[in-house]
Amino acid sequence: MREWNTPEFTLPGALRPAILVLCLVTAAAGAQAPAPEPEPAAESAGAAEPAAGPADPAQFDAAAATVNRLHETLLGVMQKAGEMGYAGRYRELEPVIAAGFDTPLIVKVILSRHWTDLNPQQQSDFITLFRRLSVATYASRFNGYDRETFSELSREALNRGRLLIKTELQRPEKKPVRLDYLMHKAGDGQWRIISVIANGVNDLSLKRAEYAVVIKERGFDALVADIQNKIKEMESGVTEPEAL
Amino acid sequence: MQQRDNQPSRLFLSILMALVLALSGCAGTPTKSGGVDPDPLEPANRAFFTFNETLDKYLIKPIAETYVDVAPRGARTAVTNFFDNLRYLNVIVNSFLQGKFSQGVSDVGRFVVNSTLGIGGLFDVATGYGLARHDEDLGQTLAVWGAGQGAYLYLPVRGPNAVRDVPDLASSYFLNPLTYVTGAVLFPVTALGIINTRANLLDETRIRDEAAVDSYSFTREAYIQRREYLIFDGNPPSEGYEDIFDEESEDESILIVE
């Protein structure tokens, strides 16, 4: 770690106190701060299970079909965005997202340790709410068409039988957006999306961090209220974005 | 162009290095779950976040929005190209530092072509010649050399950062030709650079404001993931994507222990 050599210059003596102060400030800010190795890739115990057998092309095709269905529906609503309106786009996307995403698993991972604190009613309500949030987000963001196309880049087999479908959204005169879909085979044998990674940014981790903060500071009910507000804002087009 | 007085530059660099040394010593607090807290400085970071958001809301963002309304798209693209080109020396140096020699050579070609045929960088002619734009900086180089990310830092004015990315503030400063320009022209050019950068981020911040229930942690997670993506040049190891699913069982076992 940090084996790079400090360039040849010396710290002016006047800076020493400043460093001291800084270290004190950071130590105080970090509350009981001094720490060992910042090892970013926390190894998940027992994650090294091999992929379930050699990747079967039929499985890949089935997983890619789920992604394609989502992409085709998105293109459809983008092309008719104006005449459909937000409500029309929402109606069109809802069944595809309900079938294509494993929302119960996604929600469980996002809420992480808080999940088990919820009673079964709260759990199932939250799954419904989160699904509405996903559909609303797609319906509000994919609100116009400017000759965008989706194309598949590659496929990869990961741990525990999961597959990764890498795709790209191409936009004329704009940088393409990489969209990687992490897929797993649900109990009913259907391939479902469990994570979407857009240009390397994974929505799941973002939401997990955010939701943890809201729950910690204001409680679970406040989180539910916040999400309901987000959905309302998108419905009413308060924040109606320009075309993607 | 004229060499500036050496004193303030040395001081600036020294302060930055001091920051890095000081912070890397205190970076990363182990959490209960045995992982590393990526944000041990959260209280200070949040304070600066609030400061920046306020500054942005009342000053920088309104100016950037007006700029987008007033300046035609073509002009804004030229401005973006111009500043990208000025920043490109830092990209070149870091391509080589990461051992990407053919990329480095191509980056030199890109800088030369855009600075000349592209009229001082206003036009990106090089991409058309197959000299693609790369995104490298000293933070990425340090990561490639094995340095850990260190604590997440939210800096006043500058925004999201991490200890590992701080030395780049110095290298991108000294490798930017604008640093060595003096005189009255410096202020408006710098201001234009800031406004243009902010204007290019309007879409991103709008999406964030639409989506986020806690903007601070949203920004932090997005920054950390985005850096990882850039370090691996757009191809981070796919295992990273599924860590979040395999951690879950760990979390549960911790709950039982607690």
Image: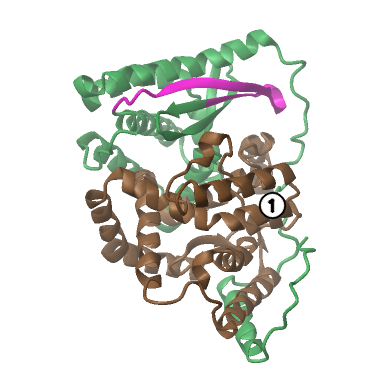
Chain colours: A green, B brown
Would you say A123 lies left or right of B25 here? left
In the image, residue B16 lies at what x, y percent?
Answer: 61, 74
Q: Is residue A209 above or below residue B245?
A: below
Q: Quadrant of residue B55?
A: bottom left
Residue A145 is a magenta residue = yes
Q: Residue at x 67, y 36 (%)?
A: B246
Q: Is residue B92 left or right of residue B155?
A: right
Classed neighbour count for the residue bearing mark 1: other residues with Cα under 10 Å, few (<14), some (14–19), many (≥20): some
Residue drawn at the location 44% of the way across and 19% of the way down = A70
- Quarter residue A90 falls in: top left
Left or right: B230 as drawn, with respect to B75:
right
- Residue nearer the viewer, A15 or A118: A15
The relative height of residue B53 versus residue A56 in the rendered view (above or below) is: below
Identify whether A66 is placed above or below B43. Answer: above
According to the image, label 1 marks what residue?
A40
- Highlighted range, magenta: A144-167
Q: Position of residue B143 (x, y in %)?
A: 70, 54
Image spot of residue A209 (x, y percent): 51, 49
Which residue corresponds to the image point at 51% horizontal and 42% vertical from the top-left?
A: A111
> Foreground: B255 or B155?
B155
Whether residue B209 is visible:
no
Residue A132 in view (yes/no): yes
Q: Is residue A1 in the magenta section?
A: no
What number of labels is visible? 1
Report in which chain the residue with disc 1 lies: A
